[in-house]
Image (cartoon, rainbow, N blue to C red):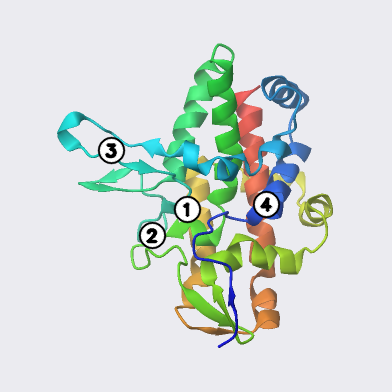
């Protein structure tokens, strides 16, 4: 067996460059007012600078879920995935009975509402945190490896064989495929991917974050046809999924811009 590629501990969604490309596309579609306020709230930095902030500070960003002394111990999790129902709609919440459910869509929805209601009066550090998390979660929720299905809770957490080498399938989506398809800079990748007309963008950004999650889960379902130990030819895999890769990254960018344009209008 060939060398093992990428350790199982990684969970960077699109990888650093893929996340940056998603956010660069979003930045290109911000309204002047949204761009001005984001520049102010991020102290002169671009939202692209925060594309992977959540991964860089993952250990500090674990969320305490519904802790009270009666249900100890504390549950600390970093919600970077979401769970789809049987019809690919997003599970609404972060708990199913006694089971905690990682749900970045649910968490993002809460942050959206909080920023909508009070971004102008919010504590500066808290506001920056919520903006940075939205920047990252919109990328996470569009990555096929960050979606859990009723019949597949693995989030692609298993090994496959790519050209005679063992590769963690989650990691194949968490950066490897993007680097194969777009070896250039994220700026050049964003320019190549950001090709939709205003009418198409309006269709992509219609609805709410739960609608987007369902569309993402539906589009990504085909990626799970490859199971543990599957033999994958790199060229065939790129041909099969490069269009999905581009559309998911592009959609995430358009939808992130839509959120910020609505929040900061």
Quadrant assignment for the N terminus: bottom right
Q: Are marks 3 and 1 in contact (CB under 8 Å)?
A: no
Q: Which residue is mark 3?
A: 74
**Residue 226: x %, y % from top left:** 50, 78
Q: Which residue is mark 1?
A: 214
Between 176 and 215, the residue placed more toward the observer is 176
Secondary element type, mark 3: loop
State the CA–CA distance, disc 1 to disc 4.
24 Å
Label number found at residue 16:
4
Q: Are marks 1 and 4 in contact (CB under 8 Å)?
A: no
Q: Nearer the viewer, mark 3 or mark 2?
A: 3
Closer to the chain start, of discs 4 and 2, is 4
State the CA–CA distance, disc 3 to disc 2.
32 Å
Closer to the chain start, of discs 1 and 4, is 4
Closer to the chain start, of discs 3 and 2, is 3
Secondary element type, mark 4: helix
Label number found at residue 87:
2
**Residue 88: x %, y % from top left:** 42, 58
State the CA–CA distance, disc 3 to disc 1.
30 Å
Neighbours of disc 3 within 10 Å: few (<14), some (14-19), many (20+): few
State the CA–CA distance, disc 4 to disc 3.
30 Å
Q: Are marks 1 and 2 in contact (CB under 8 Å)?
A: yes
Q: Quadrant of residue 31?
A: top right
């Amino acid at each position: 067996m060939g060398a093992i590629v990428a350790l199982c501990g990684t969970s960077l969604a699109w990888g650093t460059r893929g996340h940056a490309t998603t956010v660069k596309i979003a930045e290109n579609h911000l309204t002047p007012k949204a761009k001005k306020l984001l520049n102010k709230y991020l102290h002169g930095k671009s939202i692209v600078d925060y594309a992977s902030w959540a991964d860089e500070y993952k250990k500090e960003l674990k969320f305490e879920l519904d802790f009270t002394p009666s249900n100890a111990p504390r549950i600390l999790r970093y919600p970077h995935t979401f769970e789809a129902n049987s019809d690919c709609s997003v599970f609404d919440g972060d708990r199913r009975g006694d089971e905690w459910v990682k749900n970045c869509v649910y968490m993002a929805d809460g942050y959206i509402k909080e920023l909508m209601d009070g971004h102008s009066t919010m504590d500066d550090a808290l506001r920056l945190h919520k903006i940075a998390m939205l920047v990252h979660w919109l990328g996470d929720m569009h990555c096929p490896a960050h979606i859990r299905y009723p019949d597949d809770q693995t989030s692609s957490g298993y090994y496959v064989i790519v050209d005679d080498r063992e590769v963690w399938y989650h990691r194949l989506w968490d950066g490897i495929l993007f680097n194969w398809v777009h070896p250039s800079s994220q700026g050049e990748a964003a320019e190549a991917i950001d090709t939709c007309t205003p009418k198409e963008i309006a269709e992509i950004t219609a609805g709410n974050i739960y609608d987007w999650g369902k569309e993402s889960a539906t589009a990504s379902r085909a990626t799970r046809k490859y199971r543990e130990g599957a033999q994958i030819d790199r060229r065939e895999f790129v041909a099969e999924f490069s269009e999905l890769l581009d559309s998911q990254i592009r959609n995430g960018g358009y939808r992130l811009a839509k959120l910020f344009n609505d929040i900061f209008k």
